[in-house]
Image (cartoon, rainbow, N blue to C red):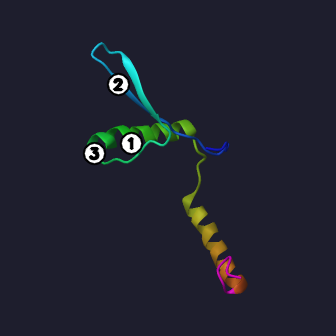
Amino acid sequence: MQYNPCSFELFGYDILVDTDLKCWLIEVNSSPSLARDTILDDMVKSKLIDDIIDLVDPLDFDRKRLFEVLERRINEDFRGNGIPNGGG
């Protein structure tokens, strides 16, 4: 992943704990799955996603205002030349 100050990268670590409670690193995943196919997936990954959002601390934004701005831009494109943006 190239450096981008507006992004982050998540790694997944597979760790085995043996009978002596010794931890063994099995592998590191540079693109771990966040799919929640099982109840255990849902329990673990929902909390992980919440923790990631808390850690990254994204700025709050108003979805309604964003929709209004996007809708206005689309309408301006259609009124400007009758063809959506990029149509010539």
Point out the image quarter for the C terminus. bottom right
* Kind of residue indicated by mark 3: Thr
Q: Is residue 18 above or below residue 78?
A: above
Marks 2 and 3 sit apart, C-alpha to C-alpha, by 20 Å
Q: How far across and down, in percent of the image, does residue 57 sit?
A: 57, 40
The residue shown at (35%, 37%) is 44
Front-most of residues 78 and 59: 78
Label 2: which secondary element: strand
Return the disc, 1 or 3, that comes first in the chain's sequence.
3
- Please state the extent of the stretch shown in magenta in the rendering: 82-88
- From the image, tell me which residue sits under label 2: 16
* Kind of residue indicated by mark 1: Ser
Marks 2 and 3 close (CB-CB < 8 Å): no
Q: How far across and down, in percent of the image, does residue 34 sit?
A: 41, 45
* In the displayed structure image, the side of residue 9 where residue 3 appears, left or right: right
Return the disc, 1 or 2, that comes first in the chain's sequence.
2
Q: Residues within 10 Å of mark 2 (few under 14, many from 20)?
A: few
In this view, the mark in front (1 or 2):
2
Q: Is residue 68 above or below residue 20?
A: below
Label 3: which secondary element: loop
Marks 1 and 2 sit apart, C-alpha to C-alpha, by 22 Å
Marks 1 and 2 close (CB-CB < 8 Å): no
- From the image, tell me which residue sits under label 3: 38
* Kind of residue indicated by mark 2: Leu
- From the image, tell me which residue sits under label 1: 46
In this view, the mark in front (1 or 3):
3
